[in-house]
Image (cartoon, helix red, strand yellow):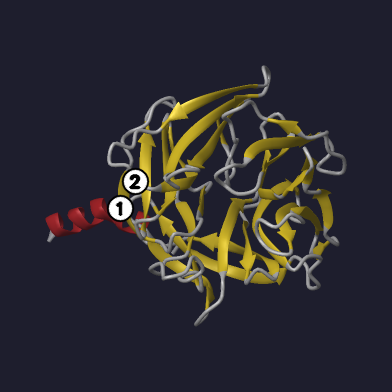
Amino acid sequence: MYLHLLFFILLLPALMSAQPPTYSNLVLTDVFKKPVTQNSHASTIVELGPDRLLVAWFGGSREGAKDVGIYASHREGERWSHPRQLLAPLVTDGDTLPCWNPVLYRSLSGKLYLFYKVGKNPREWFGAMLTSDDDGVQWSAPRYLPDGFLGPVRNKPIEPEPGVLLCGSSTESPSTDAWRVHLERYREEEGSWERVPVPNPREFEIIQPTFLQHGGDTLQILCRSKHDRLVGSWSYDKGNSWTAADTLAVPNSNSGVDAVTLASGKFLLVNNPLPRGENWWNGRSVLDVEWSTDGLSWQSLFDLERHAEGEYSYPAIIQAADGTVHVVYTYDRRTIRHASFRLGER
């Protein structure tokens, strides 16, 4: 009896750590009720301060159209501001190029970044960025990244060291449409960019990595793929080198995901967990929040959206300083939806 009790006591911490967190105070709101464009997609979110958020997305008549620009809205307390256009399509050399995939990030130095892409399509786009020193009230003029660099292609960077932004990036080949992931390191002080390869000997078709921080020097990326599941890679030296990419047992409908490392050390993932269909939008009618303690085994915590059809996709997730989790995502291309909730332990 004593041995059984001792075994249970020793096992109890592991059992408790494996219990899913509880969630409460789930609130869903639309960032805007009356769309300012026909199509809105690919939102990003950053915390500016207590009860202060900034969200950005691209909008226009349709994805890739020549009228697509970058829009943004602030939230103070519970109220979202009317969307304003931050960036118009780029007119250059007699052509008009749409904007794509904004990414907001506030570095440890306090500087606010808006990374984005410009181009006819993801096979030909190029990277650009704005910066702000006053929480997005005013922005710098656009700065175009050096040739061959895109910046964070869809998800927020991380900062393994102060002043060094590690950005998840990827390319889509103009000739073969092959998808390949790489990382890019941006040093704030020098304003320099450096490419970091991710080995992919099995040639997985992968794009749009998001980061998990496991403590110490250990990092992990999760990537969207054409293989009906996520693909990952690991680094044990703060992102300087990476293991060969490999599949994870996490179903995904070939849609963008985002993840966050919580203050507790656990991880959350926002994912479209259905199989992909004949068309690119198939499988995006369910959007869930999943949790993990190790980045390998994931369990669904709850559904943000569950419908027979429609597109609820391209999430971005952060945890605010007060512990509240914030998610923004495309709501059927009509608006951007914001979800907030609190986490607890069982």
Which of 52/254 is in front? 254
Q: Quadrant of residue 313?
A: bottom right
Residue type for callout 2? Phe
Image quadrant where one finds the C terminus: bottom left
Residue at 82% across, 59% down: 83
Q: Secondary structure at mark 2?
A: loop
Q: Which residue is mark 1?
A: 14
At which x and y percent is residue 147?
61, 27
Q: Residue 204 — which label? A: 2
Between tags 1 and 2, which lies in front? Answer: 2
Residue at 67% across, 34% down: 107
Residue type for callout 1? Ala
Image quadrant where one finds the N terminus: bottom left
Judge whether 112 appears above or below 275 on screen.
above
Residue at 66% across, 44% down: 119
Q: Secondary structure at mark 1?
A: helix
